Every structure is written in structure tokens, then in C-alpha cells.
Image (cartoon, rainbow, N blue to C red):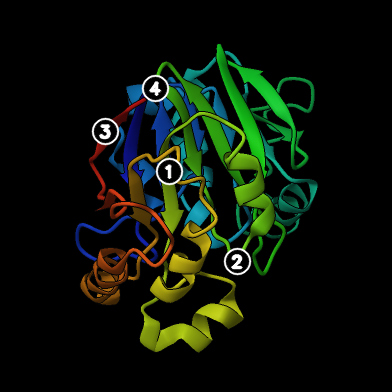
Amino acid sequence: MKVRVLGCSGAIARDCRTTSFLIDGRILIDAGTGVGDLTLDEMQAIDHVFLTHSHLDHIAALPLMLDAVSSRRSQPVQVHALPETIAALQAHVFNDVIWPDFSRIPSSTAPFMRYGALATGQLLQVAGVAIEVLPAVHTVPAVGYAVEGGAGWWVFSGDTGRNPAFWQRVNQIPMAVLVIETAFSNRESLLAERALHLAPHTLAQELAQLDPARPCPIYITHTKPSETELIMAEIQRFDARTPHGFAAPHDIRWLRAGDVLNV
């Protein structure tokens, strides 16, 4: 399975695009500004979009992508999300004020987009790929995802604060890659706690819940552009001390737009 990182930043700046991952060319996990780097043909090939939650940095490109390619497609794009996320899209984006309601045009029977409601813990088979909906703890209803590849599961935390249920589940599956957010540096710990994001010191506490017998590469995502270097330096400092009981430091890497992960 090929996971192409279109965007993985917590905000925009030059060379910083917000969250979006393209899986095998047909499945989009979140629709942040990184989608804008795709060609029309690449956007047209996307049949399924899985959203973690309703915040703008994770949905910003969805209306524009649909507008760009809907007339070229013969089938609607399937947008999968929690019921609360779908309700937010309907009320605040596809409301015929901010953007046309693509779930009703050109007609309600043959729309450009169809919604599919998800539930945490659900396992789906989409485009020949298994996708599990994982729990997340955020300021709005949110989820993460696990996607099965040939070498194991690609696991994405989504935007989340401390999340014991997430670790309980991922320790039960053969995880090949973990992509986990760390939005703020330790100096912004109070803001991270209020916003239900991780900072390096809480990331350390979260990673302590990983099964040490099953290590895998860990990629850090959703860093704020102004703090990325500080966040990664703080992570490397805590990881060198291995306070989590691992025999050796984690394999922790900084995720970048343009990376391709083969799972």
C-alpha cells in the first residue's frame, strides 16, 4: 500500500500544507490544503474521502476539489465521516451560502457527493482496502484511522489529546507505521491541553502505552510551522532518555509533505 503525504502541517506557510493523505491513489484521508498539489487527473481518481473531524485545516480543500473534478466523474465522491462532522459540513460549508450543496447537485438522485456516516470502532472494506475507525479525543467529535497494508496497518491518530482507548486498540493490531500528532511545543503546553492536542511531554506519556514488544516507525505530524524545529528537538530529547521502558529509543521521524510511505 502506498501512502502519499499531501499535507501534514498544523497550519499553512511556504512548503507547509495541512493534513491530507492519499492512499493508493483512490482514498483520501482528510482533505486539507495539500490536496491542491494534485493534478486534475489525480483528483478525479479519488472515489472516497475519510474525514477525521470538521476543523478547517482538515476539510479546506474538499469543496474546491469537488468543484474541480465533479463534471469529469460519472459517480459521486463518497465522503465518510462521523454524523456530527457531516452535520457540520451541511450547516457550515455545503449550505448554498459558503459553497453549493454538492450532495444535491446536479440532482438529489445523481449528486456529485454522497455522505456515509461512520462510528468509532467500525471496520470497512473500501476499494479493496480495510479501514478501521479509531477513537480520538478532540474539541469536536473526531476519529483516527487504521488502514491495512501488505506489511501491517498504517495508523493515524488524527487530532487528539490523551487517548487511552486509542492505545488499547492499536496494541491489538499489527501496526507497521504510526502517524501521530504533536501540534505544540512544551512551552505551549497549556494551550495544547486546552485545544486537546499533544505536546512533546504528553506525547511521551502517550507513547509509554505502546506495546514495547512491537516497535514500528513513528512519524510526527500536525506541527505548527513556527514551532516545528523546537517540537522535534524536544521530542528527540525525551526519546533519548527512553522513559517509557523501551530497551532502545523509538524510531521517531518528522513527517513532511511529499513523503511516500510504503506499508
Q: Is residue 159 above or below residue 106?
A: below
Tell me which label, 1 or 4, sits earlier in the chain: 4
Residue wearing tag 3: 260
Q: Position of residue 142 (x, y in %)?
A: 66, 55
> Of discs 3 and 2, which sits in the foreground?
2
Assess whether mark 4 and mark 1 are in contact (beta carbons under 8 angstroms): no
**Residue placed most toward the observer, 140 or 208:** 208
Q: Which of pointers 1 and 3 indicates the residue nearer the eye?
A: 1
Q: Earlier in the sequence, mark 3 or mark 4?
A: 4
Distance CA(mark 3)–CA(mark 2):
27 Å
Q: Which residue is pictured at 31% across the width and 34% down the height? A: 38
Distance between the alpha carbons at the discs numbered 3 and 4: 12 Å
Front in this rendered view, residue 185 or 236: 236
Task: Name the amino acid, label 1.
Answer: Leu
In the drawing, does residue 102 fall left or right of residue 26? right
Q: Please give the residue where the numbered disc 1 appears in the rendered image.
A: 178
Q: Quadrant of residue 50?
A: top right
**Label 1: which secondary element:** strand
Q: Label for residue 25?
A: 4
Q: What mark, if any, has residue 162 been given in the picture?
A: 2
Q: Residue 129 location in percent, x, y?
A: 55, 17
Mark 1 or mark 4, whichever is nearer to me: 1
Q: Residues within 10 Å of mark 2 (few under 14, many from 20)?
A: some
Q: Earlier in the sequence, mark 2 or mark 1?
A: 2
